[in-house]
Image (tube, rainbow, N blue to C red):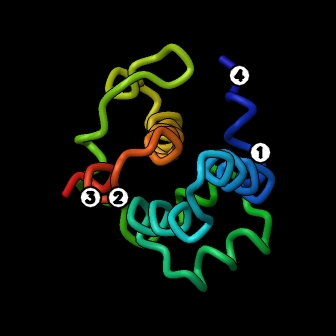
Amino acid sequence: MAEHRIFSMAFAKVYPMYVQKAERKGRTQKEVDHIIKWLTGYTQAGLQKQIKKENDFRTFFDEAPAMQEKRRLIKGVVCGVRVEDIEEPLMQEIRYLDKLIDELAKGKTMEKILRE
């Protein structure tokens, strides 16, 4: 089976869309960055480096310093698919991020988004 095309898509191309989605709903780029750093363990400098290098999603997640253990608590539907039921590990990581950004845009508090 062919690899999904999002795996080779540059994270830097999608990142502005995450920010735009959040900002349209009155949230901030800082909150988007906080969510990404929480999920992946990147520092702000590390996140900016990934964006600057235009690494694809596979590399972005492969190089993540410390994936958040609480990410397994993320449940719900993204693109018509339950994130907890996704079998392909990389796709599940991408959809976890999508779900967190969706929750931010829907007005959830950061405490709830970060499963605190």
Residues under numbered marks 4 and 1 in contact, where contact means CB atoms less than 8 Å apart: no
The residue indicated by pointer 4 is 2
**Disc 2 from disc 1: Cα separation:** 27 Å
Residue 60 spot, x, y in % from top left: 61, 60
The residue indicated by pointer 1 is 9
Q: Quadrant of residue 41?
A: bottom left
Secondary structure, mark 2, is helix
The residue indicated by pointer 3 is 111
Look at discs 4 and 2 and give the one toward the viewer: 2
Residues under numbered marks 3 and 2 in contact, where contact means CB atoms less than 8 Å apart: yes
Q: What kind of residue is marked 2?
A: Met
Mark linked to residue 110: 2
**Disc 4 from disc 2: Cα separation:** 36 Å
**Disc 3 from disc 4: Cα separation:** 38 Å
**Disc 4 from disc 1: Cα separation:** 14 Å
Disc nearer the start of the sequence (1/3): 1
Residue closest to the eye, 21 or 88:
21
Q: What kind of residue is marked 3?
A: Glu
